[in-house]
Image (tube, rainbow, N blue to C red):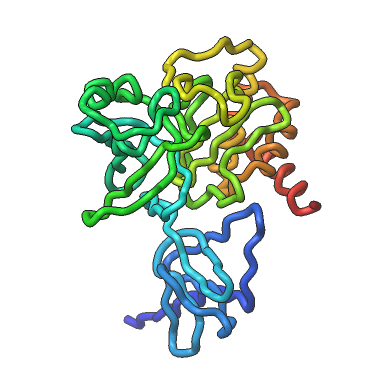
Amino acid sequence: MELTILSPVPTPKTDRMEIDDELVHLVNPGETVTTDQQFMRGHGTYTDGEGTVISSVAGAVERVNKLLSVRPLKTRYTAEIGDIVVGRITEVAMRRWKVDTNARQDANLLLSSVSLPGGVQRRKNEADELQMRQFFAEGDVLVAEVQAFYGDGTMGLHTRGFKFCKLRNGSFVCVPPVLVQRCKSQFHSLPCGIDVILGLNGYIWVHKKFQTVEGDDTDPTVYYSSTNDDISEEERQDIARISNCISALAKQYMHINDTIIVYTYEASLEYTVKELLKLDVIESITREASLRMRSN
């Protein structure tokens, strides 16, 4: 009996590195990222004897100058100091809150790292500790900034400042963290009158504009309110439409930023909100948004 040995199919190689602004360059384990020897390998890659950069995990290619790395799609959020994150309170502990931020461990929000009602600048005391649930309770959603890291690897958050507060008047969307692009600001006001907070941890909050936010003189007590403002039917439709557009971009593994969200929203206006859940509609609106991004 004669055996036939089949040679492995060679992996297609890329002579140069090309990453579109709105599309994620996905690779599989063992797939060639680039053969250009001017690039250096980073996390999630290795090189062969000829200097070819090869992926060791399934994920998205990230490029920083001449450094190439592959960030796994199915992974927890890895924080950096200064990141804007959206989180959910999971536990009220002694002088701190535990916050789910889509990371390997819950983050810590210390009582000393939040603003007091009325903007009072003083040390927190026992009375403040007894009233912690008046600030944040279990299940509350908030936006915060990564401030530090502790010895056990957990991150420390803070909500000092008028843009960091308890979130309401909106809808929560979860996407892979690798898809959320870093922008000059993660707080965006869309032309349709809806605001979006793009948490770098993959948690996104789509909400109605805060009516009380006029400037730095606003009373911080409103930021701890758990009562939603009056939301019209049109605003509810826009919030739902924006949320479905973000989910559509995530299903197509496209980078998520304020510009691509606006283009996808405009492309979706010819469909109803429920129709945006259909696969053919998702492909149509994301394709149109991608073409507009490339043309600009």
Query: How far across and how far down the image is residue 165, in percent?
Result: 46, 30
Using the image, determine if residue 205 lies above or below residue 232: below
Residue 279 vs residue 53: left or right? right
Q: How many marks?
A: 0
Which of the 4 image quarters holds residue 78? bottom left
- Residue drawn at (39%, 81%), measured in percent from left and top? 5
Which of the 4 image quarters holds residue 216? top right
Pick the residue in front: 187 or 257.
Answer: 187
- Residue drawn at (65%, 33%), measured in percent from left and top? 189
Pick the residue in front: 72 or 78.
Answer: 78
Query: How far across and how far down the image is residue 248, in percent?
Result: 58, 37
Query: How far across and how far down the image is residue 178, in percent?
Result: 49, 52
- Residue drawn at (58%, 83%), measured in percent from left and top? 38
Using the image, determine if residue 160 lies above or below residue 105: above
Using the image, determine if residue 165 lies above or below residue 257: above
Q: Quadrant of the N terminus?
A: bottom left
Asked whether residue 30 is in view, the answer is no
Query: How far across and how far down the image is residue 85, in percent?
Result: 45, 42
Using the image, determine if residue 196 lies above or below residue 236: below
